[in-house]
C-alpha cells in the first residue's frame, strides 16, 4: 500500500457485487500478501461479497506486534521450496548456493509460474504484483528490494531460512544436490591450474557441473557472512 493509506481508514467506492479479494487487489495488494481480513469485527475470507458501509481491516501475512493467531493464510509447512520468476536470476543463484530448493529458468512464462504455484508446494517469488494476483497462485511473495544482495537478506529474513541453510550443497545451474567426487574421476575435465592447486571437488549428478573451493567460493562465503550479519 502507498504510505498515505497505511494504518488509516479510507473509503472505497465500487459498483455491483465485489468480493473483498477483488477490492483489495484493486488497491495493488496481491492476495498472497494478505494474512487476515476482519469485516465488521468478524474474521472472513476472500470470497466475502462486500456490502455498503462495511468496515474492513486487512492485515499482512507478516506484521510487527500483531496477533498472528487468526491468520487464515500461511506458507506450507516444512522445507521452504521456491519457484522464482525470470527477473530474479541472481537471487535464485544466491539461494541455490545456500542450499535452498529453487526452481528457476530464465525462459519461464507467467502461465507456467502460476501453474507451478497453483500446486501449493512452492512459493512464488517475484517483483510482479500482477502475477501474484492470479487466482491460481496459492503461495507467493512480492520481493520488495531491487538489488540481489538486499533481496537475499529480505528472503532469508522473511522465511527464517538461517537454520535450514546448507551452503554450497546445490548446483547453481540446475538446482541438483551436489555430491563429492574423486579428483581422478574428473581429471580430464580440469584446467591445468585447477589440477595443480585443488584436490576437493563436488559434482552435480544432473548436469555434471563440477565445483571446487576457488576464488568464487571465497567471495560468496564473504557475502554470506555479510548477509547473516544483516538478517
Image: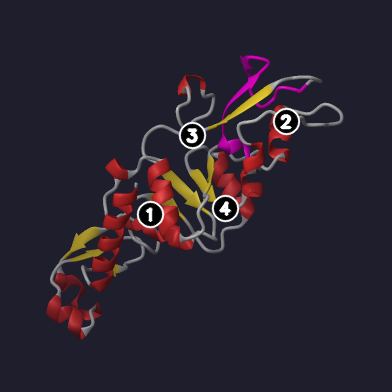
Q: CA distance from mark 1 to mark 2?
A: 39 Å
- Residue drawn at the location 32% of the way across and 67% of the way down: 208
Marks 3, 4: nearer the viewer: 3
Mark 1 or mark 4, which has the lower sequence index? 1
Q: Position of residue 119 (x, y in %)?
A: 54, 39
Q: Residues within 10 Å of mark 4 (few under 14, many from 20)?
A: some
Mark 1 or mark 3, which has the lower sequence index? 3
Marks 3, 2: nearer the viewer: 2
Q: What residue is disc 4 on?
A: 127
Q: What residue is disc 2 on?
A: 10
SS of the residue under disc 4: loop
Magenta span covers which residues? 30-50
Q: Position of residue 79 (x, y in %)?
A: 36, 39
Residue 68 forms part of the magenta stretch: no
SS of the residue under disc 3: loop
Residue 95: numbered disc? 1
Q: Is residue 16 visible?
A: yes
Q: How is the image coloured?
A: secondary structure
Amino acid at each position: 500500500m502507498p504510505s498515505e493509506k497505511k494504518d488509516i481508514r479510507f473509503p472505497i467506492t465500487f459498483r455491483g457485487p465485489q468480493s473483498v479479494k477483488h477490492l483489495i487487489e484493486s488497491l495493488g495488494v496481491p492476495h498472497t500478501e494478505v494474512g487476515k481480513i476482519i469485516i465488521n469485527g468478524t474474521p472472513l475470507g476472500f470470497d466475502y461479497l462486500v456490502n455498503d458501509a462495511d468496515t474492513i481491516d486487512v492485515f499482512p501475512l507478516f506484521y510487527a506486534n500483531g496477533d498472528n493467531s487468526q491468520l487464515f493464510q500461511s506458507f506450507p509447512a516444512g522445507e521452504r521450496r521456491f519457484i522464482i520468476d525470470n527477473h530474479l536470476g541472481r537471487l535464485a543463484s544466491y539461494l541455490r548456493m545456500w542450499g535452498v530448493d529453487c526452481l528457476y529458468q530464465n525462459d519461464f512464462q507467467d502461465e507456467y509460474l502460476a501453474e507451478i504455484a497453483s500446486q501449493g508446494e512452492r512459493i512464488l517469488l517475484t517483483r510482479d504484483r500482477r502475477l501474484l494476483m492470479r487466482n491460481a497462485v496459492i503461495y507467493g511473495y512480492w520481493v520488495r528490494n531491487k538489488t540481489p544482495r538486499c533481496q537475499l537478506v529480505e528472503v532469508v529474513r522473511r522465511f527464517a531460512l538461517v537454520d535450514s541453510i546448507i551452503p554450497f550443497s546445490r548446483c547453481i545451474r540446475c538446482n541438483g544436490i551436489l555430491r563429492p567426487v574423486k579428483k581422478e574421476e574428473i581429471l580430464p575435465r580440469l584446467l591445468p591450474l585447477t589440477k595443480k592447486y585443488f584436490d576437493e571437488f563436488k559434482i552435480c549428478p544432473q548436469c555434471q557441473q563440477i565445483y571446487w573451493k576457488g576464488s568464487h567460493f571465497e567471495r560468496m562465503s564473504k557475502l554470506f557472512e555479510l548477509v547473516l550479519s544483516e538478517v
